[in-house]
Image: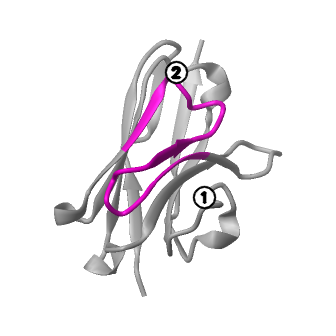
Amino acid sequence: QVQLVESGGGSVQAGGSLRLSCVASRPTFSGYNMGWFRQAPGKEREFVAAITWSGGTRYYGDAAKGRFTISRDNAKNTAYLQMNSLKPGDTAVYYCATGRPSSTVWDTSKYTYWGQGTQVTVVS
């Protein structure tokens, strides 16, 4: 069993930045993709970004392109999501997840382990 713990959420003004972190409880993290998703009230969970184990390939959802950056540090069992130019529409609970390599990184069913989420609120 792998536990994922997100941190770094909070309330920020529009145009501001936040950096989310996701720490895995043990190194089974290795070889797995890492993804970030978000879910706003009354909406389905939405793909934000994903990164392969090597970090060589990164994927972004439409809302994240050009503003968010995903990265990982395998030595620390940690993944990050740097979010810049935040908008009120980015308000959601952000979840990290990890799963075996897959080309369909936007598919929630491809992820085996999920964190509990961290709230991000962007105020105008």
Instruction: Residue at the far bottom: name it.
Output: 1
**Quadrant (top left, top right, bottom left, bottom right) of the C terminus:** top right
Q: Residue at x 33, y 53 (%)?
A: 55
- Residue 112 visible in the displayed image: yes
Type of amino acid at the residue the image marks with label 2:
Leu
Q: Which residues are magenta?
A: 48-70
Is residue 84 rendered to the left or right of residue 60?
A: left
Marks 1/2: CA distance?
A: 23 Å
Q: Is residue 93 left or right of residue 79?
A: right
Element on which disc 2 rests: loop
Residue corresponding to mark 2: 86
Q: Is residue 45 left or right of residue 116?
A: right
Image quarter of the N terminus: bottom left
Quadrant housing residue 91: top right
Mark 1 or 2 closer to N-term? Answer: 2
Q: Answer whether residue 3 is magenta in the image.
A: no
Residue 69: say if magenta: yes
Q: Residue at x 39, y 30 (%)?
A: 18
Residue at label 1? 105
Compare residues 21 and 61 and report the one nearer the observer.
Answer: 61
Point out residue 107 in the picture as x, y percentages from the top left corner: 69, 61
Amino acid under disc 1: Val
Q: Residues within 10 Å of mark 1 (few under 14, many from 20)?
A: many
Q: Is residue 2 above or below residue 95?
A: below
Is 91 above or below relative to 22?
above
- Whether residue 82 sits left or right of residue 93 in the image: it is left
Residue 5 sits in which quadrant?
A: bottom left
Question: In the image, residue 85 lies at what x, y percent?
Answer: 48, 17
